[in-house]
Structures are given as C-alpha cells and as structure tokens.
Image (cartoon, rainbow, N blue to C red):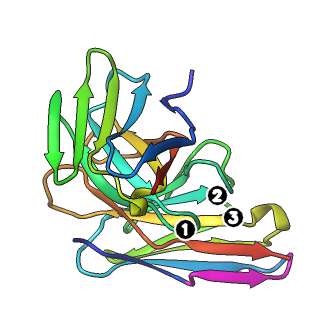
C-alpha cells in the first residue's frame, strides 16, 4: 500500500525555538496532505490542509503564523512549529491522499512526537 | 452533538469471539467512512473503508453502513490479542478537492486471552 513517511519521529526542543516536521509520500504523488494533532487519550484534530503550490487551509482556532505549512512539491509537506511552548507538546501526524486514485483512501505517516521543555 | 460519536470503551472481548464497534455521525452529507486502528503511541492504520449501504468484508473484518440511520460499524471475527488497540471511526464528506476526515474519539478494544 501507499507509504507516508514523517521525520523526525520524535523531537525535544527548548521553549521559544522552532521545530520543522517533514511529511513525505514515498511511492505516490499527493497534491493534498493533511496535518493533525493528537493529545494523549484524545482523537485526532485536523489542523490544516496542505495544498501543493498554494497556501494551506487552516482549521478554525489554528494559528497560521505559529504553524507554518509549506507544500513545495507533490511528495513533501512540512510543518514548522514556531516559537514552541510546552502546550504545543503533542503527537503530530500527517496524512496524504494519492492523486488520481478512485475513492478517498487517505494514508497516515508514522507521526512525530514533539516535547517542548 | 459531536460530528462523529463512538463509545470510548474500554470494550473487552474474549479471544476468538466477535468484537463489535459502533459509530454514528451527524452530517447526512457524509459519503465515505473509514475505520482506523491505532496502537498506543503509534499513528492510525487504515483497516477498511466503505461507501455504500450494506456490508463490506475483508478477511476477519466486516464494515457495515446504514446511511439512513447514520450508523457505521466494524465487526472483528475470531478476535486476537493483537487486535487490542483503539479503533477510530472517520467520516468524509468527499467533496472532490475538499476531502477532510472527521474522527471520532475512538473505542479502546481489549482482547482477553
């Protein structure tokens, strides 16, 4: 099946610094990718929809200047958490939909654990 | 009312029995429905998706959809300890070019050996 890879798998950073998380579709092209955040024992919450070659669409309540998304190619989207604070510590997951495939099957990356200290 | 509702569990099922997971959704415009399995600390893994009313079977898994009742379920036959995980129901309006999944909070399933 389709593979979506995230990097890094886990990262610890100091409060006030920025962290970049990469999401790659390894064997397919993805015009659209999605970024989710999941706090412990809670469900996945969609943060934004990343569109190749255009601006990301953010969900209500998500600060676009804090969570910068860049989808520069058909296989790569990046999420940068700027000026991270401890409350940003969470499990960040990306997903991608394979272009030109009937149906709406969406595959997830392995996720990235962010801890801000 | 939550867009996608699931019983949080935990649901305990003896090994070899049938596990039944349920999900209801509020948006009648929903077109496609997904079941994901998520192990603790890991990313969700797609198990099945279903678009049409009725049953869809894949190995030990059967998804059931009833759009009139806005209800989707997942049956796991011959439950194995490795099936112990949180199962997430996700719903998509599937307007082409605007496909976003809305997740339920998940049901924690424990298979008892």
Q: Are marks 1 and 3 in contact (CB under 8 Å)?
A: no
Residue A48 is situated, as x and y percent measured from the top left of the image, at 52, 54
Near-viewer residue (B27 or A81): B27
- Residue B17: x and y, percent? 33, 44
Q: Which residue is mark 2?
A: A64
Q: Is residue A40 left or right of residue A36?
A: right
Q: Are marks 1 and 2 in contact (CB under 8 Å)?
A: yes
Counting residues from the N terminus, which is met first, the one under dot 2 or under dot 3? 2
The region drawn magenta spans A8-15
Q: Residues within 10 Å of mark 1 (few under 14, many from 20)?
A: many
Q: Quadrant of the N terminus of chain B?
A: top right
N-terminal label among 1 and 3: 1
Residue B104 pos. (x, y %) = 50, 39
Q: Is residue B67 above or below residue A99?
A: above
Q: Residue A70: image x %, image y %?
A: 50, 72
Parent chain of label 3: A
Q: Which part of the image, by quadrant, shows the C terminus of chain B? A: bottom left
Question: Mark 1 highlights which residue?
Answer: A69
Q: Nearer the viewer, residue B61 or B79?
A: B79
Q: Which mark is residue A90?
A: 3
Please state the chain letter of the residue tagged with numbered disc 2 in the rendered image.
A
Q: Is residue B93 shown in magenta?
A: no
Mark 3 is surrounded, within 10 Å at the Cα level, by few (under 14), some (14 to 19) or many (20 or more) other residues, namely: some
Q: Chain of mark 1?
A: A
Which of pointers 1 and 2 lies earlier in the amino acid sequence?
2
Q: CA distance from mark 1 to mark 2?
A: 8 Å
Residue in view at x 57 percent, y 81 percent: A9
* In this view, B9 is above or below A63: above
């Amino acid at each position: 099946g389709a593979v979506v890879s995230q990097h890094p798998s886990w990262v610890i950073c100091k409060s006030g610094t920025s962290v970049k998380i990469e999401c790659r579709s390894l064997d397919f092209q993805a015009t659209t990718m999605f970024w989710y955040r999941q706090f412990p024992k809670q469900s996945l919450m969609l943060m934004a929809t990343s569109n190749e070659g255009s601006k990301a669409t953010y969900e209500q309540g998500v600060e676009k200047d804090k969570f910068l998304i860049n989808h520069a190619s058909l296989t790569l989207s990046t999420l940068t958490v700027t000026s991270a604070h401890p409350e940003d510590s969470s499990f960040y997951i990306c997903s991608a939909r394979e272009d030109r495939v009937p149906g709406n099957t969406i595959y997830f990356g392995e996720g990235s654990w962010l801890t801000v200290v | 009312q939550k867009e996608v509702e699931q019983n949080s569990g935990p649901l305990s099922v003896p090994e070899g029995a049938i596990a039944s997971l349920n999900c209801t959704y509020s948006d009648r415009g929903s077109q496609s429905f997904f079941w994901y399995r998520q192990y603790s600390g890991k990313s969700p893994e797609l198990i099945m998706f279903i678009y049409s009313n009725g049953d869809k079977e894949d190995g030990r898994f059967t998804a059931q959809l009833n759009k009139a009742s806005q209800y989707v379920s997942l049956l796991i036959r011959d439950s194995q300890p490795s099936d112990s995980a949180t199962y997430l129901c996700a719903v998509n309006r599937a307007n082409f070019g605007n496909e976003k999944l809305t997740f339920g909070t998940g049901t924690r399933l424990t298979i008892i050996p």
